[in-house]
Image (spheres, rainbow, N blue to C red):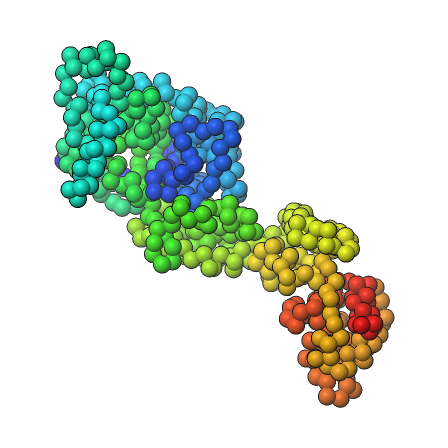
Amino acid sequence: MSSFPAQTPATLRGGAEHAVAKVDWLGGEALPEVSQERSPTCTFRLPMAALLKRLLRTKTVLVAPGLGVGRREASLGTDPGVAVRVRFAPSPTGIPPDESPRRGGPVGPYQQSQRLALYAQATEVLLRSGAAYPCFCSPQRLELLKKEALRSYQTPRYDNRCRNLSQKQVAQKLAMGLKPAIRFRLEEDAPAFQDLVYGWSQHEVASVEGDPVILKSDGFPTYHLACVVDDHHMGISHVLRGSEWLVSTSKHLLLYQALGWKPPLFAHLPLLLNKDGHKLSKRQGDIFLEHFMAAGFLPDALLDIITNCGSGFTENQMGRTLPELVTLFDLSRITCHSALLDLEKLPEFNRLHLRRLVSNKAQRGQLVKKLQALVEEAFGSQLQDRAVLDPAYLERIIVLRQGHVCRLQDLVSPLYSYLWMRPTVGRAQLSAISQKADVIAERMLGLLERSGTSFTQDMLNGELKKLSEGLEGTKYSDVMKLLRVALSGHLQGPPVAEMMVSLGPQEVWERVQKVLSS
């Protein structure tokens, strides 16, 4: 049995001055929208599992001093000294591209249609050496082989029918105008290799598979040829991809041997599973990042929860940002165990990261703009006073509610509708709480007169406690409940003092006056 030299994760760290890494996720969690050729109008959706692999690529590259390279179609960069090219277009995950078909880069082109000559050259080398051969089998015949195998409860495989065609037979078929696919001749005794995650591995692919197509009749490569050719010409030294490709690695190593090229190192990543142990599927529309982005979840929160459920760190903790994840990540700590993703915890992760944004003045300004758009969208023409769209008012709401809401969208939910529209409160609602609603309202107006045009929560908390003094049979809790209903229309919600600071003295005055006139 042949084998490749043992490699260790340390190669990715301090000693690798020219480490060039890529992540490949064209396997089980691949994007269904990604085709061999991408049109400018394609829409790309990124599954959660793909984000995990994208993030692992980011961190792996950053711990290696040198250039990081990914796939061909687009790119995701993280650092001025790091270039990462990946197969599909970037999405809003906080990991922006620095190389792509549009922007170019040092190892382009980045679209397969522009690299067909490279695949053709490699295929010609394999044909001349006898490591590959033309296959003229029709799609109909291949489909019959598949159906027959399934009928016999066997794994479908090509029967290598065209492997032993003579040169004369090949010439005759070509003269008939037939366009063959090119298949790679799998040999016994596949080389063993050391995976950086799973350790030593070796798979006798020739005993369980038919010879694979490497170049289709239209001149486009299959994944098996494309990944080998592109990784070689792009100078890839480390390949990170899903564990479902572990078995195929021996096949790829045979291709490297046949072409006389040095293979990169491989690290196969464990699966990302639902908390019930089932694999995340791209057929579940709600696992795509766009779904979470539209629902108000932040990129940092998604990165945080995905890395929190996996391995690669000394310990897992909530609230880590991308720079922190990059610093703490260690490829040697990735285990073979699948990661369980519990999305019920995502709101709590988002709450932590939203609070971090609120504490940053520049980021808070962006949140104000987003909330302004959300209010317009949710209430639009129903707004009685468009002053609620004033940035200062919106910023005050965001600051006061930080740590209490998980998403900006929560602030336009029915619970917080009082912030944007005056509630309709009937006398019956107030009387059901206390028969002394008018007295409480009068005392509240007096408090507002004494407080002037500004007040703080601490000051109000002390003053509000005095409102129930001397009111026989009326508890402080009843007073707060009545005021909360008067101000918001709800029995539950933020503390009354916070409601008053949020709304401002004038608006509180108007709403309390409305109680007296109802």
Is 5 displayed left or right of 423 in the figure? left
Q: Residue at x 52, y 26 (%)?
A: 102
Is 22 displayed left or right of 199 in the figure? right
Label tally: 0
Give the x, y percent position of residue 497.
Answer: 72, 69
Give the x, y percent position of residue 141.
Answer: 21, 28
Give the x, y percent position of residue 454.
Answer: 80, 64
The image quadrant of residue 405 is: bottom right
Q: Residue at x 66, y 57 (%)?
A: 398
Q: Quadrant of the C terminus?
A: bottom right
Residue nearer the viewer, 397 or 486 = 486
Give the x, y percent position of residue 465.
Answer: 73, 79
- As displayed, is residue 208 above or below residue 133? below
Q: Residue at x 16, y 23 (%)?
A: 163
Q: Quadrant of the N terminus?
A: top left
- As displayed, is residue 126 above or below residue 295? above
The image quadrant of residue 435 is: bottom right
